[in-house]
Every structure is written in structure tokens, then in C-alpha cells.
Image: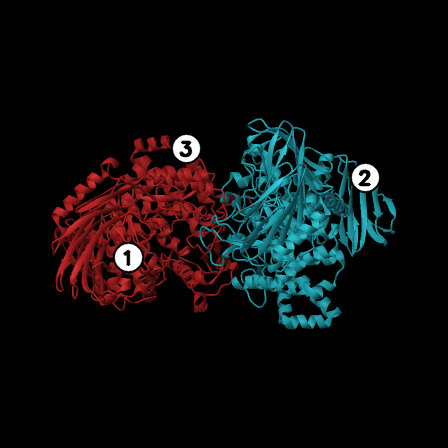
Chain colours: A red, B cyan
Amino acid sequence: MKDYIKIDEWKIIEEGFDPHVHKISESIFSLGNGRMGQRANFEEAYSGETLQGNYVAGVYYPDKTRVGWWKNGYPEYFAKVLNAANWVGIDIQLDGEQLDLAKCEVTIFRRELNMKEGYLKRNFTAKTASGKQVEVEAIRFCSMADDETGAIKYSVKSITFNGEITITPSIDGDVKNQDSNYDEKFWDEVSKEARQDGGCVQMRTKKTGFEVATGMKFQIVGGEVSSEPIIKEKYIASVVKTQMKAGQTVTIYKYAANLSSQNHPTEQLSTLTYAMLDKVAAKGFDTMLAEQVAAWAKKWEHNDIIIDGDVSAQQAIRFNIFQLNQTYTGEDDRLNIGPKGFTGEKYGGSTYWDTEAYCVPFYLSTAEQRVTRNLLLYRYKQLGKAIENAKLLGFDNGAALYPMVTMDGTECHNEWEITFEEIHRNGAIAFAIFNYVRYTGDEAYLADYGLEVLLAIARFWSQRVTWSDDKQQYVMLGVTGPNEYENNVNNNWYTSTLAVWCMQYALEVADKVKATDKTKYDALVAKISFDADKEGAGFKDIIAKMYYPYDEKQQIFLQQDGYLDKEQILVKDLSASQRPINQKWSWDRILRSCYIKQADVLQGIYFFEDRYDIDTIRRNFDYYEPRTVHESSLSPCVHAILAAKLGDEKRAYEFYLRTSRLDLDDYNNDTEDGCHITSMAGTWMSVVEGFGGMRVRDGKLSFNPFLPEKWNSFSFNVGFRGTTIKVTVSKEGVRVKNLSGGDISIMVYQKEYNIFAGQDQLLKP
Amino acid sequence: MKDYIKIDEWKIIEEGFDPHVHKISESIFSLGNGRMGQRANFEEAYSGETLQGNYVAGVYYPDKTRVGWWKNGYPEYFAKVLNAANWVGIDIQLDGEQLDLAKCEVTIFRRELNMKEGYLKRNFTAKTASGKQVEVEAIRFCSMADDETGAIKYSVKSITFNGEITITPSIDGDVKNQDSNYDEKFWDEVSKEARQDGGCVQMRTKKTGFEVATGMKFQIVGGEVSSEPIIKEKYIASVVKTQMKAGQTVTIYKYAANLSSQNHPTEQLSTLTYAMLDKVAAKGFDTMLAEQVAAWAKKWEHNDIIIDGDVSAQQAIRFNIFQLNQTYTGEDDRLNIGPKGFTGEKYGGSTYWDTEAYCVPFYLSTAEQRVTRNLLLYRYKQLGKAIENAKLLGFDNGAALYPMVTMDGTECHNEWEITFEEIHRNGAIAFAIFNYVRYTGDEAYLADYGLEVLLAIARFWSQRVTWSDDKQQYVMLGVTGPNEYENNVNNNWYTSTLAVWCMQYALEVADKVKATDKTKYDALVAKISFDADKEGAGFKDIIAKMYYPYDEKQQIFLQQDGYLDKEQILVKDLSASQRPINQKWSWDRILRSCYIKQADVLQGIYFFEDRYDIDTIRRNFDYYEPRTVHESSLSPCVHAILAAKLGDEKRAYEFYLRTSRLDLDDYNNDTEDGCHITSMAGTWMSVVEGFGGMRVRDGKLSFNPFLPEKWNSFSFNVGFRGTTIKVTVSKEGVRVKNLSGGDISIMVYQKEYNIFAGQDQLLKP
């Protein structure tokens, strides 16, 4: 754990230069606009430890898999988000001496991520080895308004230096992924050009053949300059020289654009890149920045959570919301949310079940409906590949198994216990459809897309269960649940519960679509050869005769068969020296232990909360919580929400703390690899569903809030079916303000209220 | 499956040159003498597909592990047997045109492995592209008499060629392992020298620092020669030229020696290599070959199994015995038996539980007592590392977990479900001690070495079980049994049975040693801080309260918890198109299925046969056999032995057939990687323990033989406590001949007989 980040309501601030935390800061101060993003690498050369990262959404590379012992069925390739051309580079030389903070005496250093306005600012004063002293201010952002562009304003002010400054803005495509399995470079050069005031490098990914043109256009203010273009492999730059004197400032404005063949005709890429550069350069940096501020203001209007009385918590929740918005904007249904977003390479930038289980609730409430719909369509479009994937594993008749990790719908992950057995992801994908329809009321989605996915998933489950002659029930053998500290278990309660629910829901939706839109229903049934009678009867038989592990004595759902055989030492009785167990214990010991990596039974109870009475929830919570080590960043939020539900406000707050500053305080000692983007949505859930007690019941928003002890108040905006309300929970009660033009009926503390358009009501329990 | 090998009682014969089977033949025709070995690569250059392989026993390299997803506890390195300097090379040029069978018209080709006399002979007639025709005969062997040497006699007879022949004998150390994880070469050059009549290359392995000097000395007969030494990186050769005419023969005798720093002072290696070469060259090829024939005659005297009436079965069993003797001679307790011996790189040439479970019975009966004792001492010497290994996994108090795969005692394997969970290997190592003492009566071994290993293993098991509050019994969680088609199961019957037996046996041996040799006992107890009362009580509690899965209804031992939940489709009802399942099914599907890779419950019944009545054995055999796919080469022998025990002679014979010609007929399509050396011991077991029904009971050999229907008779020699008997089973009965100077008392068909020295008795049931 680190605590070098300064506390501020709207800003992330680092003061003083410490190379040891630089890679962490590169992650935390990352920028993105949904279309592209980058780590907070320095513009000028830096010879110290750094993880260079520039990413273009949706551009990936299938790296050849590396395994120890090949298992049948493993995918050959692992799709990775690519480290793309670096467009931030601005090399600075002072009379030939390179400005490199690793080699300077840095007297002042301040890095600031302005979350309100969406830019990164860096100021420093440095003295080179030979004693030349300069002051630098760098501001940059990835434009939300023009999302294929970014801009940098980089000013060097001489303090003591009199001489020639050389400024070399560049586009450097000669990059590689640090996580390349075989140390290969993934890009080939297509073309490059260096001009007097900029240039462009176009590159093509090996195998996948994506092309990306990355260009720059720059302008120098503050002196007479000479400029000379240079070209190297996958690299273009301009060497700009000017004389400067102590007290003088030279500023370079660098505009960059990243255009991808996914969005433009390949043969026009560089032409369009230059056109885009001309367009934004014509606007100029200040206008672009103003548009950026405006775009973010609009985001915050919908998204902000305001916490009064706890600046650290305020900063944290905004950081989470900020990063989520930088990662995914919902404009493009080919894109999704990688666990590290644009902040690092780890987890390959691919899509996991994190999206459906954790991110969907966030986007449902804080973004327009189409954003979540696009996330759903992403999976719909990959249904064919999910069916293909299931076929490879021996399933048939249109059964679909969505991949555990994917970029384009094919499975990337190769660890059998996860790849083949962590099949609950299929359930989360179905649940997201349910959740979306429950929230938005968009039942048309079901007829158009949802049912097709649901039936394919239900078919998978119906084939994946096994009839046990011994039990005279259906069992679910060989799975890994959300708790990845168990592998290849039988009858994981969560997976079995979700599987049966999927079949139930698929049948329910089938009936509904049949009743409301017979034409579409018939078309679908014909398309996928669904035998409603026979297959439906099969589903129903499984629904009726499924086996769920249960402990009669303690009246709890059992995580899986045999769980009670484990040695039951509670986490609190485990020596601190043994934790985190995933760093201290060998894998087999972890597997044999009773310790739970992340909510498993409780994840199921969270999904299907309405099925269980409060005593059942309490018994299971009281049993599993003390056994959960929360070594997944996705875990505490579910516990926070359930603790809140159970009225345990203190614990709910503790769980919230564990997620909200995870990256800012580098809790797990891994922020340097990138930020935990998807779990940030869990932080949002902790506040809104936990403290706010928000649920959707019978097509209405329902709230059951409490105010954490340390806070004076907190408020959040929620969009719901065309209406936006602002909910403020304070000591005086719950204030609900209807921000939109229509009325809304909501439940607060089990009582129904109609809030008229524009009305602001204070409600008390 | 292939069947190109000609049937012969004593020879393995290939006729006609087919490049497609060349790599298979390179495996089958491999040579070895326990100290070194090699694949049957051609002497002359060959540009076709080949797997080059020369190996020096005990010289290994810890290759950096390659894994997909690192799990805590994985070893960093995987020790591999090294491809060492190639000493067989004899390049032939005819007026500058290289003799290369891949580029010649080969009219006659015959490869013959003379198992009786221990050499490889190859004859061929080839016409080069330009029409030069020669006849070649090559004979070579790895000397049993001088086990650091080998010899080649290579004769070229001109048929049509008149001109200059260039003969280039070489030592080529510039080799690499095909299975190198990162394409590295594992050897550095130390020194090299080329002389007029030979030379030497000395190399050192990276990391491990083994040095091996490989030298040659040659002599040319048949013409006036000029010779010119050449030197390249890690390579020396002599270019010898002479003129030849049609009808003339030129012969090169090439003597080679491999001396390793394991056995000699490093600084004298090359000197000693030259001395060794002088020694064997002075003997000459014919004398060396005569000694080879004599050494093998002595082996066969002890080892041979004679089958009358089935030449194919005769050839197969001799091939198995031959390869076992080539692989391990028992002279050196630092060596062991790699699953592929000296016939390939696969499985790293390391030690597996194969040695204890399958090879020990073979060596006990066919070799001197010290051979098996050396195999036991090999593990004794690695006890410290086994304790270290267990410590890494969280065990303490001197608990030992022997590695799954090892070269020097450290674990090499990195696949968690096997590395950490296939812990039954520990039991096999204990069982081998029991088996050795039962067979030899060498109880002194227990006090000197055995007990220390047994207690360390018992300590491991006592910590590895878990007390289940739920069951009020001890359970064994998270293991993989011999059936590797199940991973991470709870309460594998075999493992639990073996674990408890280990504790029982350790206590029994402790009592015995305490009673018979109090001094050694006290010394050991002090050395390992064994608290006999407390730890003993702990063991006994586990022994008394262990849980074993059992099905009351069918009265069978259950392979593991939950086995009955599986879909029970018998192997015979599985479509042939689905087999072998390890090539046709994804791993998760294999795991969910009821199919058994190799004997698991039945392996336990085989080990502890005397505990179970015949009905119990039959019930379990009848249940598990139809579910076993035998996709491990180690499986059928156990089934053969139990089928024989149950009187099912037909099935016993079928199982025998599956193992005996596994490599000769390339049953599993993988012989090109090397031969299945350790499972060859299983073939021997099928004959002697299966058809011969041999057991040791109460310190006596006992036989319960039957004659397979197709055979007229079979006979085998068995050494037992200083006596050797020859057992011949024929239609007339069982003939037992005592070949030694002392009397022996044996049981045949439950009746006791005393066979006097030299006596030959015919016994009938």
C-alpha cells in the first residue's frame, strides 16, 4: 500500500519526483476517451523504469499461446490489446544535452490529473547534469469531442539556460508489447512520411491486418525555428531548433490523430489522418481543451457522486467514475471494457464476465440506454463464435459457450480450469440481458436479439449438466465458480443456480416473445431450429430435478460438493504473515483451503436477492464472509451491498473502502501494471446499491439508503427510463430531485412517491 | 499402428528404406549401455527427417520453465536430459558428392538390431544422383564391457564407382535439444583438438556445469589414405581421402568415448578420454564386439523369457527386456530410468514413479539385488530435497514429498494438478522399499536407509490429510490419482489407501528396527527428531479414522468422491471415432467423463492384493475395467495381472498384447519421440506376474501359472535371494529348474515344493 497521492476532491495529484512510483503513476494518471488511450508516460525522453503504453480500442493481436503442457481444446492464440504508436514523444535537448528526468536534479515536480476537465498536467523544474535549469509545463488530453485525436501543450521555460534548444516531436511506431509471449513485435510498417510541421506513420498488425495511421502536426511558439524532418524504421520526427535565453519560454503544440482501418477505408487512412490533424490544429489547443472540459462536464452531470465530509472518499469515487468513462463510452458496439482499460497491457485488454456482472449496472444508471445495449449487442454479434467455441468442446445443436477472455468472440484463455470450466460467465451474459430489460423496460430487445442468445446459452446448460443415476438428479460436474481458489469442483451452487435460472428465463422470454411478437418468434425458432416442445421439456426436467448442495445443519447453500470437508479456519484467525495467500501459499494449498477469493454463493444471492428471505441471506453472509479473502478486486463490492442490505452499515463501509482507493493507494501492489478498471464499477455499485440501497422492482427504482457514519451526505444521479433523478442522502433524510421533464414514481424505504418533473422532495424513513 | 518390423526371435529387422518411418526406427533401433545411449541415427549425412539424439546418463540441463499462467509453487526449471555430442558421424563423399540416403536411389536397405548380441547393423546399396553406386555395411554398439565407449565398423564397397572417396569421421558437439523451451543451446565449448587419427571435444553444460569429453580414434583399412584434421565450433573431424575402384572395399573403424565430470576429475577428462580410446582401439573392434556378445549373453542368461509358438510375442518380450537392460544397469545409484531411456528427449529423461511402481519388480527378479537397492538409494539420497520440496508447499517437521519428475531431487514438473496433487508417487516410493525387502529379505536396508524415508513420507501424509468436522473422519482433499483423467479430486481411494498404508508400514518398520537395532533406531530418531509417542499416536489416529469412498450398493471401492455422479457409458459403447479421447475430446470433457486413463483403484488392489478376497477383486475389476481406456502405456499390465488372477486368461492375453508390441508396432503413433521404456517393465510383469502368477508370500516365491492358448510354452528365469530358477510353463505342466548352487522352496499352485540345487522338476496343478 502506498499513500503518495494527494487528497483533492477533483484532482489526482503527485508532488515531488520519485522514480520508484513512476510506473504506478503512469497507470493512475492514464488518459483515454473510449477510442484510444495511453499511460501517463513522459513526453520527453526518460531512461528510468517505465511501461510505455498507447492503445487503440479494438485493435488487437493474436499472440501465439504459451503453455507448459498442452491440453486438448486450448486456443492457439491469445488476443492482446496492442501497444500502438507512441504519439506523445517530444524530445528536448539543451545544447545537445538531453532532458531526461532520470538524469536530472528535479527540484519541483507535480503531476495532476484533472478529472473534472479531463486532462493531465505536469510541471517540473529540472537541472541537467551540466547545470542547465529549465521549468516545464505539459498539458495533454485525449479528446472526447474528436475522439481520434489528442493534444499536447508543452512549454519549456529557461531559468538559467542560454543556448540552442532542440525540440523533436515524434511518432514512434517501433514499439512492442511487454507481454509478448515470444518477444515478437506485432506491427509491420506500411508507410511513413515526415513533413516540416508533422508527419504520419501507418502500420499494419501482423496476422489480424488492422491498419492504424498515427499522425502529428505541431506548432512552435516563442522563437525563430529551423525544422528538419527525420525518418527511421516505423518512426518519423522533426528536429526543431531555436535559441533561447534565461527567462524565455518556448512552447510546442502537438496535435495527434490515430485513425484505424476499423473505421475508415484503409487506402485513405493517412489522407484522412492529415485532414483530421488540420481540423483540430485549426481549432487550436485552447478550443480543443474547452470542448474537452465541456464534454466532461456533461459526463459528470450524469455520473457524479458527491460525498460531503470525506475528501478522500470523494476523490476515490470520482477517480473510479472518471476511469470508467475514459475506458468505454458506448459509442461502438464492437468495443468492450478490458479489465485494465487503456492503462496497461495486462489481461490482454480483452473482455471478461466483468463487463456483464459489474460494469452493466454502472452504465445502466449513468449512461444512455444505448450504451448498455451496445455492450449486449457486442455479445450478440459474437454468438456465432460462442456456438463454435462450444462445438470445439463437444457441444452441439446450437449450444453457445461464450469465451472467458475474448477480443473478437474467440476464446483466448488457456488454462483448462478457467477456459473450459469457469462457465458461469455464460450465466452472467444471460443475466445482463435480464438486468438490462428489467432496468430499461426495453422488451423489444428480447425479440430482436436477447432470446436468440438466451436459447443458445440454455442449450449449453442443458447439455452441460449430467444426469446422476446415483442421485436421481441432475448434477454439474467439473466447474470453477467465481471463486477461482477452487478448481474443477462438482456442483458449484452459484453455477448450478445460474444455469437453471438461465433455462427458466430463456423459456419465460420465449413465451413472452411468442405471445407478443409471433412473427419474430417463428422466424427465430426456424433460424435456430428450436424445438420448443421437446427442448423446452428437456429444460423443464432439468429445472425440476437439479441438485444443489445444501447443508441442512447450518441451513446454508454449500459453495460446492465437499466444501464442509475443508479445515474451517476463519480469515481472521489466519496469520497476517500468510496473506495474501495467492502470494504466500502454493496453489494446491490454496485449493484445499476453505478460503474464498471472491464472492461466490454471495454473488448468486446478490443476483437473485428477491428469492431469499433476510434470514437466509444473513446465514449465508455470516458463513461465507469470514471465509472470504477478497483477493479479487471484484469481491468487496458484492459484500458491501449485502452487508448494507443486512443493515451492517459499518461493514458495508469497510468493504467500500477496500475497493474505492484500490489503485490510488496501490493496495494490491500491482497498480503499475495498470488500473483495475472493471472493479471500479463495483465501487460505484457499493455506493449506489449499497449505501443507496437502489434496486429495480416492478419497473420502478427503489431506494433504501443509509448514510455512512463519517459522511455528512452523499448524492448521486441515476438515469431511469428517460428520467434522471438526483438522490441526496444526508442526516436530514433522503432528498430526491427530478432533473428531467417527466414525472417518476419511486420507492423510498418501501413507500412509493411520485416526483414530478423538476420537483425536489425530502423524504424520511 | 504400423507393422513394418519383420518378425524374428532375436532380431528387430527393417527391410527397404522408407523415410516416413525413419524417425520411428531411430527410436526402435536405439542403443544404450546404461551409461550412455543414442538413437539409431545414420552415420553418414542424412538430409531427411531425423531426430538426432546422443545421451549421457545423469548429465542434464535445467531448462527455464515455460508456462501459460504461473501458479505459486511452480519450479523455475525443468531438468532435461541433454542431447550430447554426436559421435557416430562418418560423412562419405564420392568424388565430392555426398552420400545421403535422402538424395540417393536406395535399392537395398536393411536395419537389424541384434538383441542377443547387442549391436545395430545396417546394410544398404545406394546410387547417388550422378549414378555412383556403393554398398555399405555399418555395425555399431555401445559397449557393455567398457561402458564409456562405443565402436563402429563402417565399410563402403564400390559397385560402380572409380574415384576418390572422402571419409570424414567427426565428433559434433554443436547440437541442441529439440524440446528446448526457448530455443537455446545447452552446451558451451571447453576445448577441442583434432589429431591425425581422431580427436576430442570437451563441453560444459550451462548452469549445471557438467563437463563431458567426447573423443574418437579411427583407423582406415583398404587403401592408402591422406588425412587432414579440421576444427569448427564444438566440432572436430578428420578428412580422409583415398582412391577406390569398383569392387574395392574401404572400412573405417571408429572408436568413441564419452567421459563425464561426474565420474572423473574435470581437468583430466580429455587425457583420460584419449587413454580410454587407446585402450579400446588396442583391443580392436572384433574383440570389443566379442566382449559385447558375452556381456549380453550374461544378461540374457538371467533375463530371457522364451515363448514357444509365437515368434511375434517372442520378439516383443525380448525387445522390452533388451531396452530395459540398455537403459539401466544398476551400476550407479545416481542414475535412474527415464520414461524414454536413451531413445528420445521426451519427458526430459527424468525419474517418475514409473521406476518404483513398474521397473522395480523387473529388476528385483532379473538383476542382482544391488540393482534395485541402488534405485532405492537414489531416492534416499534425494530425501533432503524431497523435504525441501514439501516445505515449499507448506509442510514441515521433516515431511517429504518426492517430486513427480526429477533429475537431481528437485521438482521439475509444472502443471499444478500433477506437480502438487499427484502425490501418490510418495506412496509408490514407500511401496518400493516394502517390495524390495519382501523380495530380498534385506531387512538391514530398513535400519540403514528405509525407515528414514518411510517416516518422512508418513509425516507428509499425516499433514496432508484434513480432519473433516462434517464427516468426523480424515479426508484427503485435492489430489490426482494414477488416473490423470481426473484432476483435483477429493478422496481418491488409491491415494488414501496408499497414504494410510505408508503410515502403518512406517510404524511397523519403526517397531521392527527399534526391536532389532536399537542403536540405529535411536540415532535416527535423534537425527530426525521423531517423537515416536506423539507422532505415532497421530499416525494411528489417522489410520483408524480415515475415510475411503465406497459404494454400498455395488460393493466397490469408489475411485473418488462423486465418481458415481458421472455418466456411465462403458468404453465398449463409445464410438471408435471418439478415441483416443485424449486426442478427440477437450480436457474438461475428459475430466467429466467416467473414463479412466490407467489403473487407479485396480492399481491399489494390485499393490495390496492379499487384503482382498477374490470376489472383491472381481467386483472392482468388473466395474473399472470396462471404464478404462488404457491411454497410458502403464495401464494394461496391471489389468493383465488381475485378469490372470481372476482366471480370465483370454483377457489377460489381450492386455499383454497391448503392451508388448507398443513401440514395435507404433501403437500410439508416438514411437518416433522415443520408446516407452518404463512401461516395458510392465510387459515383463504381465508375463511373469500375470501368466506366471508369480508372487512373494511369506518370504517364498509362489506361482500360479497358466499357458496362453496360442503358445506352446513360455519360460523365464527368476533370481530370488541368491538362487536362480527357470520356470517353464507348457502343456505338460510347470517345469522348475534350479540353476544355482543352493536349494529353494517355492509354492506352485498353492503347494510347496523344495527344488534342490540343479534339480529340474515337472509340477502339475
Q: Amino acid at mark 1?
A: Trp
Q: Which residue is mark 3?
A: A531
Q: Chain of mark 3?
A: A
Distance of mark 2 from mark 3, alpha carbons? 65 Å
Residue A336 % position (x, y): 30, 46
Residue A116 marker: none
B267 vs B322, left or right, is: left
Q: Amino acid at mark 3?
A: Asp
Whether callout 2 and callout 3 share a subunit is answered: no
Q: Chain of mark 2?
A: B
Distance of mark 3 from mark 1, alpha carbons? 42 Å
Closer to the camera: disc 3 or disc 1?
1
For the residues bearing labels 1 and 2, Cβ distance under 8 angstroms:
no
Count neighbours of disc 3 (C-alpha within 10 A) and say few if under 14, some if 14 to 19, many if 20 or more. Answer: few
Closer to the camera: disc 1 or disc 2?
2
Q: Which residue is mark 1?
A: A684
Q: Amino acid at mark 2?
A: Ser
Q: Which residue is mark 2?
A: B730
Q: Nearer the viewer, residue B275 or A514?
A: B275
Helix, strand or loop at mark 3: loop
Q: Which is nearer the N-term, disc 3 or disc 1?
A: 3
Residue A647 % position (x, y): 33, 63
Count neighbours of disc 2 (C-alpha within 10 A) and say few if under 14, some if 14 to 19, many if 20 or more. Answer: many
